[in-house]
Image (spheres, grey):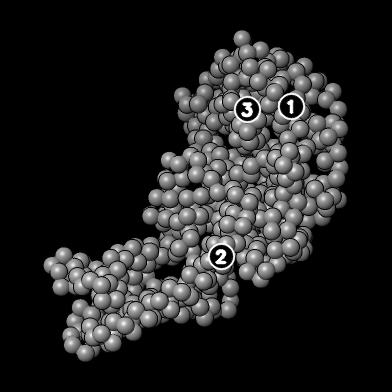
Amino acid sequence: MSALEVWTFRLLVVVALALFSVQMATRLRLVAAGAQNLRWDRFPERFRQFLVDVVFQARVIRAKPWVGSAHLLVFWGFVAFAGFTAVESLRGLGLLDLTETHWFRSYRVALAPFAVAVLAGILFLLVRRGLFRPPALGQTVSKESILIGVLIATLMVTFLLDLRLEGGAERVNWWVHMLVILAFLVLIPDSKHLHLVLSPVTVFLKSPVLGDVPNLDFEREEVGFETVADLPAKQRLDAFTCVECGRCQEACPAFATGKLLNPKKLILDAQRAMLGGQLDAKLVDVFDDGVLWQCTTCGACENQCPVGIEHVPLIIGSRRGLVSNGEAPDYLGPVFNNLERRGNIWGLTYDQRDKFIASAGVETFDASRHSYLVWLGCAGAFEADYQKSLRALFEILHANGVRFGVLAKERCNGDPAKRTGNEYIFQELATQNAEELRQAGAKKIVTSCPHCLKTLGQDYRRFGLDAEVVHSAVLVSELTSHVHLAKDDEVTFHDPCYLGRYAGHTAEPRALLHRVGAEVKEPVRNRDNPFCCGAGGGLLFEEHESGKRISQERLDQLQATGARRVVTACPFCSIMLKGAQASTQSSTEMVDLISYVNDKLRGEGRGAGG
């Protein structure tokens, strides 16, 4: 290259790097200004999710195989071309010319298949975006997306031409290729393609625990997120990493049923507020009115996000800020009062619980005699239908020689308070419960409520509870592994969000159903990607839900399978789906998993223990 070309290229590189650095510095300063909550613990788990979601792009491919595969081709193409770009940049800067070495020539030839793959992938994505216009991406075709796609295609075309061109044509081709790379450098920070830089970090920093919301430290007067300035570092990093793919939007049950909540818009609104200098703005003003209370905390958004964004902590943190200022919705007031005064969500006295325990003949837990403590929860103490499920569980445990007991007194685990932002009530309940469970010597706890499973098994670890907590479906699946009944029924199974998505228990309920002779017809959303029943996040108590009721949408999906029975494994899912069923006069039978299994075992005359 001539001296003029070298100095011209050097000048262009300096300008491009300066523009890139200025834009990046603005964003990184905003991230650094947030409260420190970037966590590097649990390194093996974080590294694993980095490999799975970044290196192998598994989350991108899982939900949309064709689109994900095209993205994988582009991603790995860029990785493969990193060395080529570095060598050509060194040559252009006049620092070192390796282009005539044997290894580089071989490397360049080996890159040809990658270039073809990237070109095929980007053309597929451009056609999809420009012609088919997926709703999640918006009906208006983004000029930025088209420009980036054309630039990527140009890079691949110029590379392939470089293999054939010589002389002046080769020189012009080289300049086109390198100018496109410099244009990328300038465009990336101020576009959704910033995820190319940030997503590996965001994915690694994402908590391995879905919907992980650390406790507030009241001694430091923490109250949650009130203004944009209160957003901590991870939530700020998330806002700048968003790729605007809309997968969270597509998965959200609130958005799907006509509500204002859009997880993608929530993240982008936070980003715009930070870049717009609105740090003192209240989050309730930044986000659309009421959207923070439309979230069921089902975790579908986080589960689908390919770049490690954590929506649930942002929403719950914002709810905490509102609750601390007395701005919770009216329907939550009685719930908070009930939890404070009575220790349960319905505000009932515990006479009903005592009567149920006495009639069921259940002993008070004694660590020296019992291997399991059965946690009843609010539904177990007061909900008649759910108590039938617990009786079935007791019968199965007895029949299999499992010795168990319950606490003499029990209060709500605090999940409704935690998910609705009332951290004070949650910590009061959790502190008392954790201490009583420790004093009781409980090392193994079984519950039929997925919300209790999440709270006792994960959240209570921050209160010093070191016990194994299992869902009844998992335990009963282990106890009945020898059972194999002939197929004689057809059911569909509704995966509770806190059992399937949060806890990852999707195989055990199905194994149970298959063993007792039920063929499972899967609904459109299932396993670790279920459609929520609408009860979570405090919405169990919301009587005036806007748009179509989430529970009704889910019931429609379940009925579309054509199965005669809907089986579920959560008391609150059962309440919501039965409510939807009552409003439509549906003939579909709603049954609890453990009750169903026990009835089938009884019907065979085998007894619950087989």
**Front position in the image: 455 or 573:** 455
For image coordinates 42% across by 55% down, the residue present is 54
**Quadrant where the image shows the N terminus:** bottom left
Which amino acid type is marked by label 1? Gln
Q: CA distance from mark 3 to mark 2?
A: 38 Å
Instruction: Give the x, y percent position of residue 59.
Output: 46, 54
User: Comparing marks 1 and 2, which lies closer to the viewer?
Assistant: 2
In primary-sequence order, the first of circles 3 and 2 is 2
In primary-sequence order, the first of circles 1 and 2 is 2
Helix, strand or loop status at disc 1: helix
Q: Which residue is mark 2?
A: 27
Q: Is residue 55 left or right of residue 190?
A: left
In primary-sequence order, the first of circles 3 and 1 is 1
Asked whether the beta carbons under mark 3 and mark 2 sit within 8 Å of each other, the answer is no
Helix, strand or loop status at disc 3: loop
What mark, if any, has residue 432 been given in the picture?
1
Crowd band around label 2 with a 10 angstrom C-alpha radius: few (<14), some (14–19), many (20+): many
Helix, strand or loop status at disc 2: helix
Which amino acid type is marked by label 2? Arg
Question: Would residue 595 be visible to someone looking at this image?
Answer: no
Instruction: Give the x, y percent position of residue 273.
Output: 67, 67
Q: Residue furthest bottom?
A: 168
Q: CA distance from mark 3 to mark 1?
A: 11 Å
Which amino acid type is marked by label 3? Gly
Question: Would residue 438 be visible to someone looking at this image?
Answer: yes
**Front position in the image: 498 or 527:** 498
For image coordinates 62% across by 19% down, the residue present is 442
For image coordinates 52% across by 23% down, the residue present is 479
Q: Is residue 103 left or right of residue 352?
A: left
Q: Which residue is mark 3?
A: 464
The answer to whether residue 202 is above or below residue 565 is below
Instruction: Give the x, y percent position of residue 378.
Output: 75, 32
